[in-house]
Image: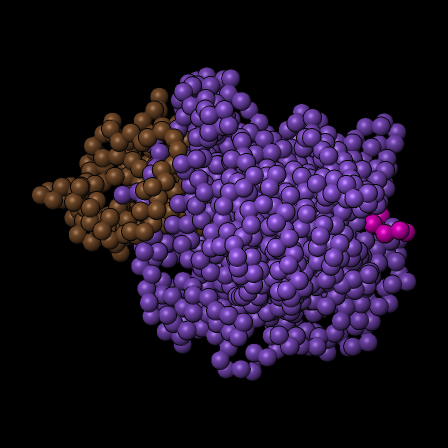
Amino acid sequence: MSTISRRKFIQTTSASALLFFAGLNREGQAASPKGYPAKKIGNIKDLKVNEPVTFTYPDDKSPCVLVKVDNEAIGGVGKGKNIVSFSTICTHMGCPLAYNKGRLVCKCHYSMFDVSRNGQTYQGLASQWVAQIVLRLDAGTGNIYAEGVEGLIYGRIGNLKMS
Amino acid sequence: MSLFKRQDSLPIPPLDAETYTTVCQYCSAGCGYNVYVWPEKKSGTAKSNAFHVDLSKQAQLLSGFSYTETMHNVITRKNGHRYHLAIIAAKESRINKGDYSIRGGTNALTAYTPTGYTRDRLKDPLLRKGNGFVAISWDHAVEIIATLTKSSMDKYGADSIAMKFYDHGSSGLGFEDNWGAGKLFLSGIKTQYLSIHNRPAYNSEVWGSRERGMHELNYDVDDARLADTIVLWGANAYEGATVFYTEHIMPNLQGGSIDEKKREFAAGEPAEEGRIVIIDPRKNATTTVSQDICAERVLHLRPNLGTDWILANALARIVWENSWYDGDYLLKRTDMSTFEAYRNKSLELATPFDTLLANAEKITGISRKEMEEAAAWIAKPKAGGFRRRTLTLYEKGIIWNMKNYDQVAAIAQLSVMTHNVGRPGTGCGRLGGHQEGYVRPPAPTPGSIYAGGPPKNVDKYITGGGGKIYWVGATDPYLSTPNSKFFKKSVKKRAANLLDYLDNGGIPSDPKAYVAKVLEAFKKTDGLFMIVQDIYKTHTAEDAMLILPAAGWGEAVDTSVNCHSRLLRIYDKFMDAPGEALPDWKILALVGNKLKALYEAEGNKEMAERFSGMDWKTDAEVFEAGSHEFGDNRVAETDEARLSAECYKGVTHEMLRKLGNEGIQTPVRQDPVTGKLVGTKRRYQYSFATKDGLFKWYGTDAWTGYPEEVAKYIDNPTYPFWFTTGRSQHVWQTMYHDKRIPEKILSLPLPYVEIHPDDAVKLNLDTGDMAEVFNEEGSCLALVYVNDATKPGLVFGLMFHERGTMNDLTSSYTDPKTTMPWYKGTKVGVKKYTGKLDDAIKTVSLLSNNDVTIK
């Protein structure tokens, strides 16, 4: 995600929630933003609302989805801030997630994640929100690049530590 | 872009990490967990680690090892060193088989850390001084409580002390803390004004079943996989006892347990995919998930609020008319001398069948066709004449319904009439809320109005000016008690009156002078000295005079049983409590021992004796001391019904530590032949828990309408909506931990209501709007979800949220037979609120949590 859209996001989203949690970092190891590959995963002109595109990232064992939704989404790129991307492995027990009507649904235990709200579990068993793929939109070409992952991809000790 | 800091890799425990077993601190399921603790600077490797899992490979779905961001934390022990903490769902537990819920999956995030989410845990005893609190020593706090309690007892009697304490297991520390509370309040102080964490009195939630001879925890998790039909009655299993649903009910509905059925059932007996009858006014996610799995095997009945016993009796009458009951069983195992009352008042055999069903349709709102179908699914014999196996589980929708006693009794009797107790795949009892862990001396009120009751209503006592000292332990009645606005207002006023008196001329620091001044205030005002003992400063603690810091889950050794197998396990200590916080039993023992010393000093042997037996040094000693309350458990398997449901006599902490996630099922008996301790898988196969071993029938009341507290709204157009409450998947109880955890509070930032689309149109409301829900009791501002979970004319509200409680709207009515409140039904008006709480709205999901189908 570009610096500009990040700043805009912070202006528009939950200020008090962010302030509150900014002071309360989770104990543990810092996320390592470095080391993620940049991968072209689509072009803005090819995306249609609610028609997901699948790809793998950061390696070929990690299925993901790129989708344009019909409302502004947390972390969204594009004019309407409505293009987002997520891992499609359920964070609960690793089943595949299907995109449907603004959410990712797991048919194993019915965990459901809201793609407009940071991949939060709004129903079901998954205690970890689904990992969101950091996107960059090249304004000139309309190409969309995956450039990082926020949150742990299920079944890995580290997103970049698979053999 | 993340709303909070996320991890993209996790620390690995070295081979020599400390390991412990525990059980989740939350719901009735009681999932097994393994705990790993290791020094911050040490690390295992992907191939060599304490998990004994190859972490270099992508975990497989379902069978893989689940270790996620929410399962790790870094704690600081009292030695000043920092340690990694990982809390992982146990694959070897037959309760959860590695599965976990959104609540248990965050167990690690609730650990106390000095700079993290839980940094505001209570660390010292706090004494109110004016508008704030000052930290004091335990000696100081104990001296105040003990001398004040003694003076109050001596002058005003034991009933001047009132208490409200948890009686459960899991997050409260089970048998150990319950024995501590029992010794102090029931043996020592002997007040009648006792109340349990979630209700105004000291009562069983299920006297309607227990007084029939049937304890409510009589089944095993296996029964949910073996049942032909599961009935969930006012019991939202998918959102309330989640892993019990996903690991035991769901496989049955999917047909995944047919092989198990074939092994367990009689030769030639049909073994098919399970059916489910869900009786709930709401179409919640338990219903929609079940429907998504097997719509044709789900029956959803949505009775009018407060009418469930009429429905249960109508189903029983259908069973009777079709002769689907087990006549031999009734003659052999039930007291037929009591059957007449049931036949006359519950089955109403004098009323023609068609008339009875027409009446029941009118009262309950359930059609005859639905009733007949439900009765057939519960009791109609299978092909070949084999008796159907039905497991019936009820919870707060029944317990906190209008007529607690009769509703529970009606359901218990329907199950016994159809012999759906004591066989594999059957059972009738509670789904449960918390886990359990009750061992105390006998309560002052032994039972309902039919057995020495009803117990005193402590809320009414306190709000009516009764009592001098009110001790609240690990519960937050400002949010959780019925008619909470009035309760809060009354307690606040009495606390302020006491404080005003104390403040006048300054609050003395010396404990003796302090107590003397409080006693003066007792004499001259209606002041209430409230003590709050908890892990956080609760809403109720705002008006406490003294706050006591308690240790929580994982900070002391605890033992409890789950609800779906009565599986007793150890919940080991793996971290230190913050600051000076102590386990509840230890706090209560400090006060009890001090009271004993005070009475000894004045030569009052009789009173000193009442407070004796609390000089425990370890949690294991408290556990052992409590076990004697269960009496002799040297009985044969066929006499298990004679044992108390939670009897663990002979079991030790050491033994449970060895058993780990396997545990042992209560009641535990000492086999008279082998002398070995043996658990009990399933109850009441041979007899019931009555003197003669026979089930006792009871004739329920007829329908007489609604109690005055709610009837006053019925024809009042200002309050056109029926209103019921319940819980959400995400959060536990009053959100005491969850309000501090971003994954939870960001997705549930506000109290919410669900409104049917037809009503939403009339009210000009849409999802994401705010609405005020109100009646003469109080009001609550809530986020609106418009969906089909409720029926037209019915509004649902999340029972309590840290930013507003729906109990401000509930009435003070309690069932006169049991003093159990009707939390689940009243009437309200709803108004659109024009303000917007944009902060919260931007993080909360506005998708409907009962829409689980992919279309």
Q: Nearer the viewer, residue B143 or B81?
A: B143
Q: Nearer the viewer, residue B654 or B315?
A: B654
Tell me residue B707's x, y (percent).
66, 75
Q: How many numbered discs, if any?
A: 0
Q: Is residue B729 visible?
A: no
Classified by dominant secondary structure, the portion drawn in magenta counts as: loop
Q: Nearer the viewer, residue B674 or A3?
A: A3
Q: Which residues are magenta?
A: B685-692
In which quadrant is the C terminus of chain B drawn? bottom left
Q: How is the image coloured?
A: by chain
Tell me residue B127's x, y (percent).
54, 48
Queried whether the magenta region covers residue B687, the answer comes back as yes
Question: Is residue B25 rendered to the left or right of residue B399?
Answer: left
User: Chain A drawn in what color?
Assistant: brown
Q: Nearer the viewer, residue B448 or A20?
A: A20
A122 versus B558 height, above or below = below
Residue drawn where x is 55% and y is 46% of the image: B509
Question: Is residue B772 rendered to the left or right of residue B282?
Answer: left
In which quadrant is the N terminus of chain B drawn? top left
Residue drawn where x is 58% and y is 45% of the image: B510
Residue drawn where x is 45% and y is 42% of the image: B120
Queried whether the magenta region covers residue A106, the answer comes back as no
Residue drawn where x is 29% and y is 51% of the image: A15
Which chain is rendered purple in the image? B
Tell me residue B268's x, y (percent).
74, 44
Considering every residue shown, the one lying at the far front of the view is: B505
Q: Is residue B842 visible?
A: yes
B784 versus B3 height, above or below = below
B368 versus B291 height, above or below = below
Tell me residue B596's x, y (percent).
75, 41
